[in-house]
Image (cartoon, helix red, strand yellow):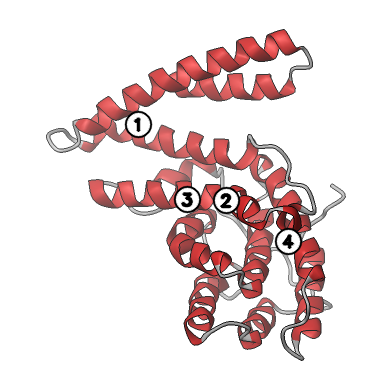
């Protein structure tokens, strides 16, 4: 209950046009987050000597609200964010990945839930693929072109291929109609590798993130739309400013951008 009130207060604070009301909502938000997290900590501390039902609600609620909070309750990313301050933009962009990674580690430590079970309740029904569009690049072709760029060292190129292989089943119109909760858990699974790639300024990692955004768009979740669109525009702006590192760069970038435009409605 406390975490739900905290999240509602956070929404109201950002929607309020009156400064004094915003301050009141901020205080209310902080109080309920503190109380909710304290209850969450107390519930999890009993995990070693209690049944899953004793702390399961706290884990599920913490998972859902943390994902909502890190995805939708942030300021919009400017289109030149990666150009102005690359490291800060990476920190902001990977925040939901870090949250998912931490929650995944917690679930594994508790040994209670399957990796995706705490996410299932976020989606009213299984995500279904749309009819195939034949006049845009096939997802497998897009991923293959990205992996063939090989702009980094052998270790970096290997990580790019590893992340691409993880992403492939979640791409729209792929052979496997993956469950939507796995699209979110992808962030936690690849976070260490993706973080390392972004720290090394791998343009392939940026392209893979754009591809993942198309899968996120396929879920059609209101709380992810603003972040997805803002970050997609910022990544595209950044990639467009880079000096082509290989002869195949321009063709690959055009293919990726064409694919993104066919899957994400930026005017919606």
- Cα distance between the residues tagged 3 and 2: 9 Å
Tell me, yes or no, whether the two marked residues, 1 and 2, touch with CB atoms within 8 Å.
no
| Marks 1/2: CA–CA distance | 29 Å
Whole-percent x and y of residue 219? 64, 52
Circle 4 residue: 235
Q: Nearer the viewer, mark 1 or mark 4?
A: 4
Q: Which of the image's four quarters has the N terminus?
A: top left
Q: As displayed, is residue 107 above or below residue 136? A: above
Mark 4 vs mark 3, CA separation in Å:
19 Å
Circle 3/circle 2 CB separation < 8 Å: no
Name the residue rendered at 16%, 33% in the picture: 50
User: Do the numbered discs 4 and 2 sit on residues whose CB atoms are within 8 Å?
Assistant: no
How far is mark 4 from mark 2, CA to CA?
A: 14 Å
Q: Which residue is mark 2?
A: 91
Q: What mark, if any, has residue 98 been given in the picture?
A: 3
Q: Mark 3 or mark 1, which has the lower sequence index?
A: 1
Residue at 49%, 60% in the rendered image: 186
Q: Is residue 57 above or below residue 71?
A: above
Q: Which residue is disc 1 drawn over?
A: 57
The residue shown at (54%, 48%) is: 96
What is the crowding at mark 4: few (fewer than 14 residues within 10 Å), some, or many (at least 20)?
many
For the view shown, which residue lies furthest in the left direction?
A: 49
Q: Position of residue 39 (x, y in %)?
A: 32, 22
The circle on residue 216 is none
Chain-order first, disc 4 or disc 2: 2
Decide which of tag 1 and tag 4 comes sooner along the chain.
1
Nearer to us: label 4 or label 2: 2
Asked which secondary structure carries label 2, the reply is helix
């Amino acid at each position: 209950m406390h975490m739900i009130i905290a999240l509602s207060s956070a929404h109201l604070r950002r929607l309020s046009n009156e400064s004094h009301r915003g301050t009141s909502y901020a205080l209310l938000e902080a109080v309920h987050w503190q109380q909710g997290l304290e209850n969450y900590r107390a519930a999890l501390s009993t995990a070693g000597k209690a049944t899953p039902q004793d702390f399961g609600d706290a884990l599920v609620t913490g998972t859902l609200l943390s994902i909502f909070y890190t995805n939708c309750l942030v300021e919009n990313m400017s289109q030149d964010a990666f150009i102005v301050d690359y490291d800060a933009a990476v920190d902001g962009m990977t925040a939901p990945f870090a949250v998912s990674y931490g929650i995944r580690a917690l679930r594994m430590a508790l040994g209670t839930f399957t990796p995706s079970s705490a996410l299932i309740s976020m989606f009213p029904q299984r995500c279904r693929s749309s009819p195939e569009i034949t006049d845009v690049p096939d997802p497998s072709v897009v991923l293959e072109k990205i992996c063939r760029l090989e702009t980094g060292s052998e270790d970096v190129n290997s990580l790019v291929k590893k992340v691409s292989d993880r992403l492939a089943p979640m791409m729209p119109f792929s052979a496997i109609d993956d469950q939507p909760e796995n699209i979110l858990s992808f962030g936690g699974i690849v976070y260490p590798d993706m973080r390392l790639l972004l720290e090394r300024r791998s343009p392939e990692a940026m392209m893979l993130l754009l591809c993942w955004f198309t899968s996120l768009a396929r879920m059609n979740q209101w709380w992810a739309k603003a972040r997805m669109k803002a970050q997609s525009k910022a990544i595209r702006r950044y990639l467009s400013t880079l000096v082509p590192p290989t002869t195949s760069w321009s063709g690959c970038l055009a293919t990726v951008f064409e694919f993104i435009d066919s899957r994400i409605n930026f005017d919606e």
